[in-house]
Amino acid sequence: MLIIRLLIIILEEMTTNTTDGYQVAMLIRDINTKLTNNINREFKDTGLTLPQINVIKILAAHKKLKVSELGMEMGLTNATVSSLLDRLEKQNLIRRERSANDRRVVYVQLTEDGVTLIKNSRETVRNYFQTLFQDCSKEEMLTIIQGLKIVQGIVSK
């Protein structure tokens, strides 16, 4: 319910004071922090962090990527990505493979365990958001969606 109130505050702020982008930014940051912390708690049993789950999610969408491509997709350095991959490899969730043509190039893909985890993760996230918004009326949901689309349009310019 707190997140809903924050989103409604964003909408009200956007319509009453369009010059105060800072307050909107702070609200978005607060919402992002709370969602990140809550989702991390949902995945506590897996022993994975949100960045590790993001690696798995990206690999599920792309099947196989170079480490550098994964870093660009995540906005992280190759060194940071390699550290994430080390932990995921130890858990048998990803595998690395050197290119036959260029030994400097390393490809990353999910293992069967990684594919299974991403399927379960999607269900966990779906359930989390369903529970989060279960007390919202249709009108509140439409207001939230409309407001978020406005924000999305503004930041996409």
Image: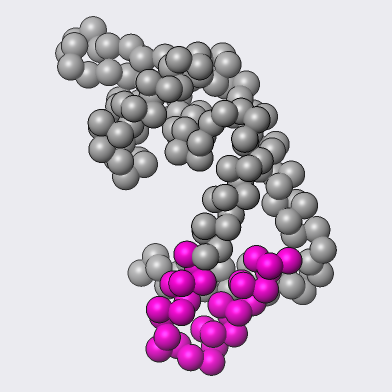
Q: What is the quadrant of the C terminus in the image?
A: bottom left
Q: Can residue 146 be seen by looking at this rendering?
A: no
Up-down: is 33 above or below 153?
above
Position of 133 compared to 8: left or right?
A: right
Residue at x 75%, y 51% (from the top left corner): 130
Magenta stretch: dominant secondary structure: helix
Measured from the top left, where is residue 98 in percent x and y?
27, 11
Q: Which of 109 and 13 is in front in this view?
A: 13
Up-down: is 81 above or below 144?
above
Q: Give the range drawn in magenta.
A: 1-29
Residue at x 68%, y 67% (from the top left corner): 2
Q: Is residue 23 inside the magenta stretch?
A: yes
Q: Can residue 129 be seen by looking at this rendering?
A: yes
Position of 17 compared to 101: left or right?
A: right
Q: In which quarter of the image is residue 112?
A: top right
Q: Nearer the viewer, residue 7 or 66?
A: 7
Measured from the top left, where is residue 119 in percent x and y?
64, 28
Up-down: is 72 above or below 103?
below
Q: Quadrant of residue 88?
A: top left
Up-down: is 145 above or below 61?
below
Measured from the top left, where is residue 154 in percent x and y?
42, 72
Residue at x 59%, y 85% (from the top left corner): 12
